[in-house]
Amino acid sequence: MMRKENLNYIFSIVLVLLFQSCGKTWLEAKPDKSLVVPNSIKDFQALLDNTSQVFNINQASGLSEIGAGDFYISFLGWQSLFNVQEKSAYIWAPTAGFYNGEQSLDWSSAYQRVLNTNVILEGIEKVRPGMTEQQDWNNVKGGALFFRAFDFFNLAQEYCVVYNSSTANADLGLPLRLEYDVNIKVKRSNLQQTYDRIIADLKEAANLLGIRPQYKTRPSKEAAYALLARTYLAMENYEQAGVYADLALQIQSDLMDYTKLNSAALFPIARFNAEVIFHSTFTYGIFNTTRLTVVPELYNDYAIGDCRRSVFFTTNANGMTFKGSYNGDKLLFGGLATDEMYLIRSECNARNGKPGLALEDLNHLRRSRWNGIYLDLISTNPNTVLEYILKERRKELVFRGIRWSDLRRLNRDPRFAVTLTRVLNGISYNLQPNDKRYVFPIDEEEIQLGGIQQNER
């Protein structure tokens, strides 16, 4: 890795370049091109390697994890939350007062990274690689495309309606900021254009990036395949989701043996472990383990003998809290891992009439999580197998910023539709399947200064 002092020096220059004034939104920010200093492949790679301040932190969707219903907090804990938007997301509040003047943290941090990637994408095109530098050049461009696609995908799960191929050309998508020239006004695209852009960026990234990364905080061909699998799954394109999950697993298919983890440890799972394809994290104050209590219905779904009962969870004052982050500490893991790819490939096989292949992946994953004698799940009924997989998916991918996207697509099928309920200070709050509040509002400043259309909720 580049020396930390050099990385911080280069990034401090770009912070000057990308500063945000008090009266500007991230879609309006106007950096001065004359201040651009990075002019080599190493410089641009150093910008992408700023993992702790920009590119690998708060990459996943925090608000959606708050709203996904896998935990509860006390009324006192809710009152003590610093950000209004955390409180609002917890009770699925209406648009009015959702931010109460705050800037949306998920929106602003994502578009900050998009602005950074556009600077890098424009800058790297001006660098002519030497004879031995072509792959390094490719990694910079491919990495920037990957990061931009990742942010657009996560933004789409929070600020756009669930993808429906029959309405996507009419549904509101994201403002697709693709140029460094911020004088170009960007309105909201349609949803089809948003997903087309995500897929195009990822496919181009896959063609450019090396197969495996030098560091797991860097994108790779494998990571691009994995994110394509996740994207196609959200689009309910189970043919393509399965194809790309398989491509990712052809490169890396490792699973940890959970029986060899120290479940008594404060955080039993190591950062950059064998399953991690791409590493990123996210957090909000609400996820503090002294506040967060896992809903009993979820914890009780882990059978005796399932190592995840003790690897993922420990007790707090109110019940069970979460300790199983693939980040190895209190920050939640928002990246990509092989266990998710097994579950995607399994689900796609079940939906495509291949229950036998689906069960092979599902049982292979479950065996690695089991202590003692494991009995394979068995069925020849694709619907039964699908139920097994979706149940496992919730248990395996808990607190990874994925559940919200799953709820959105699965709520379209009455067999899997779920009503979420929380009680706070004696008041019951509900989120019905397909409720318009499955789309978060855009903050008031962005609407007023950016001139973009608000979500209907």
Image: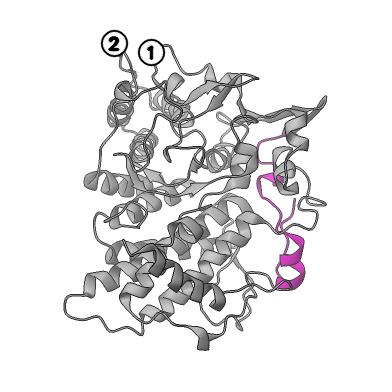
Q: Quadrant of residue 189?
A: bottom right
| Name of the residue lying farthest toward the front | 5
Q: Residue at x 47, y 56 (%)?
A: 52
Residue 449 numbered mark, or none: none
Q: Which stretch is magenta? A: 431-457
Above or below, comparing residue 172 to residue 274 in the picture: below
From the viewer's perspective, tell me whether residue 124 is left or right of residue 312. left
Is 448 magenta? The answer is: yes
Up-down relation of residue 303 to residue 44 (above or below): above
Q: Position of residue 226 (x, y in %)?
A: 36, 49
Report the residue marked by disc 1: 305
Among numbered discs 1 and 2, the one appearing first in the sequence: 1
Q: Is residue 437 above or below residue 309?
A: below
Determine if residue 160 is in view. no
Q: What residue is at 69 percent from the left and 29 percent from the top?
A: 73
Helix, strand or loop at mark 1: loop
Residue drawn at x 59%, y 65% is 190
In contact (CB < 8 Å): disc 1 and disc 2: yes
* Quadrant position of residue 66: top right
Disc marking residue 373: 2
Find numbered disc 2 in the image and state the secondary structure of the residue it sits on.
loop
Asked if residue 117 shows in the view, the reply is yes
